[in-house]
Image: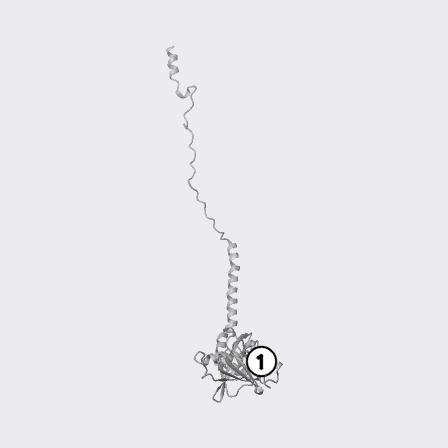
Amino acid sequence: MAGATTAQRGTPSSDRPGRSPRKGAGSPKPPKSPKSSKVPKRTAPRGPGAHLRRGPVLASLAAAVLLASGGTWVLYGSSWLRVERVTATGTEVLTPEQVLSAAAVPVGAPLVSVDTDEIESRVRGRLPRIDSVDAVRAWPHGIGLKVTERKPVLLIKKDANFVEVDASGVRFDTVPKAPAGVPVLELNAAGSPSARRFDEDRLLHEAVLVAGSLPAPIAKETVQVKVGSYDSIVLELTGGRSVRWGSGEQSDAKGRALTALLKAAPKAAHFDVSVPTAPAAAGS
């Protein structure tokens, strides 16, 4: 009996029935997951295809550079687009040769390099009779100058000559002979009560305003514009006729009224349009 008891005690605890083995005993550990993973950068392939794509781009750039260089040479370096001919149109009193001389266009220069603004400025500065000038390039070899001359509406007697004045009051030229159809100013306002208030420049402005507003048929028949004061302007017409105009105010309406009077009373010698809504004619 004692031997049997000894044998039971000597049995290992792991072989004892009813007990499971310890956790992890003899089993492999699971692998640890990485904290971060680096994705390698993708690089463009460096095979022969990359060189094939780069070739057309370089060729296009080279062609653009050559085209730009060629265009610059044609405009500035070649003899194809240079100034060979300069013309002037629109002159009446002046001659085209006078305009061309004042313009001084550099013949033989590249047409693209010609400064048209500078040409226009030269013409206006050297020829005060020119009111406006337009300089344009006429490809491939020309420069055209289109001018508009000032037109006198009034003359100021100065010694034996006449100073021409345009509708803007600009005194632009002095001529030895009075142009036909342009009235002469007679300014006699020294004794006027309003002389201190309206000086000579202001009265000249009023006279120019009146002369510039006259209908063309009446302007051709006007010989003199007499200014005695601001509101005392008289026109002397051909045939000894006279017109009491008054001031320069409502000049357009006065011009229409005078046109109607001249038609209604062609034999009258004196006309009054100082009040254009009540014009009058008298004498014969």
> What residue type is disc 1 on?
Ala
Q: Work out whether residue 138 or residue 96 is closer to the camera in this orientation and state it.
A: 96
Looking at the rendering, which quadrant does residue 84 occupy? bottom right
* Near-viewer residue (33 or 282): 282
Above or below: residue 219 compared with residue 58:
below
Query: Residue 245: image x %, image y %?
Result: 53, 80
Residue 49 appears anywhere in the view: yes
Q: Position of residue 200 (x, y in %)?
A: 45, 81
Number of numbered discs visible in the structure rendering: 1
| Residue at which label 1 appears | 280
- Give the image's coloring scheme: one colour
Dot 1 alpha-carbon crowd within 10 angstroms: few under 14, some 14 to 19, many 20 or more = some
| Residue projecting furthest to the bottom | 160
Residue lying furthest top = 1
Q: Position of residue 85 (x, y in %)?
A: 54, 79
Q: Is residue 24 left or right of residue 280?
A: left
Quarter holding the N terminus is top left
Is residue 94 something that shows in the picture?
A: no
Instruction: Name the spot of residue 210 as percent of width and height, x first.
Output: 53, 79
Secondary structure under badge 1?
A: strand
- Image quadrant holding the C terminus, namely bottom right
Nearest the camera: 76 or 283?
283
Res 259 quadrant in image: bottom right
- 58 to 42, vertically: above or below: below
